Image: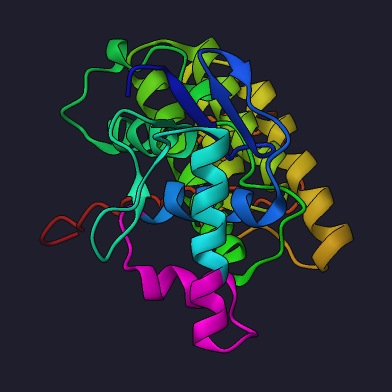
Amino acid sequence: MSTSVRVCLLDGFRVAVDGVDAGGLPRGVQRLIAHLGLCGRPARGLVAGRLWPDVPQAQAQASLRSALWRVQRTVPGLVDASGSAVALARGVRVDVRELLEAVQAVLDPATPVEHLGTPTAALAGELLPGWYDDWVLLERERLRQLRLHALEVLADRLGAVGRHGEAVQAAYAAARDEPLRESAHRTIVRVHLAEGNPTEAVRAYESFREVLAQELGVPPSRQMQDLVSRWQVRGDPGRRVPAGVPRPRSAPPTRRPACPGV
């Protein structure tokens, strides 16, 4: 395309042409652009059936042709409708695709940590809030799970190279998005322990334990408890043990074998 076009689907729908909001796109046109931004290059019949599922196929196909015509009038060249499939034109940027690239970079062990840039910002955003189409709901949950997992992995990777401040931000971002997700809170505890802040680790554990008890009436998993209990200093009976965490049992004393003839 001769112009720069960006389609934004995270935290709301927007199409920008050379940095200027296109605006004024009818709902049917927005749904078409969003679907193509998420699904690549689907067949025309699949797009028509997905976007207009409650009408006969012939009417759905007519609605698709109308939406394509409106797109071409508003943003010429945005959609490639040649052949039996439709897709966004080559060169159109989509923020969801950029998020998936950021996730892949985080999850790929071969990606150097220093190349991740400002990852927590790159991994932010909810897909099309307020949209309730089935295909949006499924993709929204898929992206949410990918983002949370990537934030946890990112926190561990940053903590492993001593970038503890950024690691804490990534871990808390995951916990903020899903307050009852234990793996996110375990990541927070691990980062605090790696930084040498056991008090913060215990505070994070106890805060999560209280929320879990209030919301679900269950304790943290044994895996979470073991993570905190391993921090307890062996041989220091005065150290405060977090509530609900069993103190590690000391090993029984080794008995020396009796000497022959004694």
- Name the dominant secondary structure of the magenta segment: helix
In this rendering, would 257 be left or right of 33?
left
Residue at image location 43% in from the left, 39% down from the top:
150
Numbered range of the magenta stretch: 40-62
Residue at image location 77% in from the left, 53% down from the top:
130
Q: Is residue 197 above or below residue 229?
A: above
Residue at the outermost bottom position: 56
In this rendering, would 207 be left or right of 222?
right
122 or 11, which is in the foreground? 11
The location of residue 64, given as percent across then percent down, is: 51, 65
Can residue 91 be seen?
A: yes
Residue at the outermost left position: 260
Q: Is residue 51 magenta?
A: yes
Display coloring? rainbow
The location of residue 33, given as percent across then percent down, is: 52, 48
The location of residue 162, given as percent across then percent down, is: 39, 10
Q: Is residue 121 magenta?
A: no
218 or 11, which is in the foreground? 11
Residue at image location 63% in from the left, 31% down from the top:
173
Q: Is residue 193 above or below residue 211?
A: above
Can residue 242 be seen?
A: no
